[in-house]
Amino acid sequence: LGVGRHRDAEGIVDDWLDGRIDKAVDTAGTRKSVMRRVLQAVFSGLQARPEEQTYAEELARQTALVELSTMSDRMRLLEMVVQAAPMLGLLGTVIGMIDAFTVLSLSEGGAVDPAGLAGGIWVALSTTAAGLGIALIAYFFATWFESRIDRERNAIETLTSVAIHGRIDPGAGA
């Protein structure tokens, strides 16, 4: 999706603010990243209705919503793995315990085959560990991707504002 290409987008906004309108519009028009697609919407709104900044803001908002929704939709599969993996591990635990108790119930005269009992316990423990391991790995990836989506959301808001209203001089208020 081209997430995280903020330096590139900063350059496009700099071109726009420095009066290199055609270059900014052409570069944003390649639509290689989320930010380029949002900036293209801003620029087209500002060019279509230069006196109505709210029009450009609304086009940017609509484009950003579509882009962020696409990113969030792709997260659903990863979140499903985070939720389902421990349950699959638990299912394996139950199956392993059933195997172990089956060995116990089939033993005659109290003599239990330790290998058969150990096999059921091994299934129980290994599936639990596998389920938890998969869930943890998926959880860390999901958290990392969600933080990238949040950074992208913040960058979209910031660069949209800068493209429409210009940069604020930090020393101007002092």
Image (tube, helix red, strand yellow):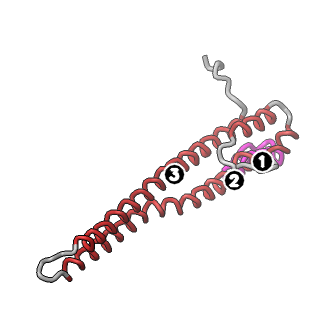
Residue 59 location in percent, x, y? 72, 51
Circle 2 is placed at which residue position?
Answer: 63
The first of marks 1 and 2 along the sequence is 1
Q: Which tag is nearer the camera, tag 3 or tag 1?
A: 3
Q: Badge 1, how many Cα within 10 Å: few under 14, some, many 20+?
A: many
Question: Dot 2: within a 10 Å radius of its alpha carbon, few (fewer than 14), some, or many (20 or more) residues?
Answer: many
Q: Residue 168, relative to residue 106: is it above or below?
A: above
Q: Which residues are magenta?
A: 38-61
Please state which amino acid type lies under the numbered disc 2: Thr
Kindly identify which residue carries mark 1: 40
Residue lying at the far right of the rendered structure: 22
Q: Earlier in the sequence, mark 3 or mark 1?
A: 1
Q: Three-letter amino acid code at disc 1?
A: Gln
Evaluate if marks 2 and 3 touch, with contact meaning CB atoms under 8 Å apart.
no
Q: Residue at x 34, y 68 (%)?
A: 123
State the image coordinates of residue 16 (x, y, percent, origin top left): 80, 36
Q: Is residue 52 magenta?
A: yes
Gap in angstroms between the C-alphas marked 3 and 1: 30 Å
The rendered magenta stretch, by its main secondary structure, is classed as helix
Q: Which residue does the numbered mark 3 point to in the structure image?
A: 141
In front of the other: 166 or 98 = 98
Q: Is residue 14 left or right of residue 131?
A: right
* Residue depicted at x 62% and y 20%: 173
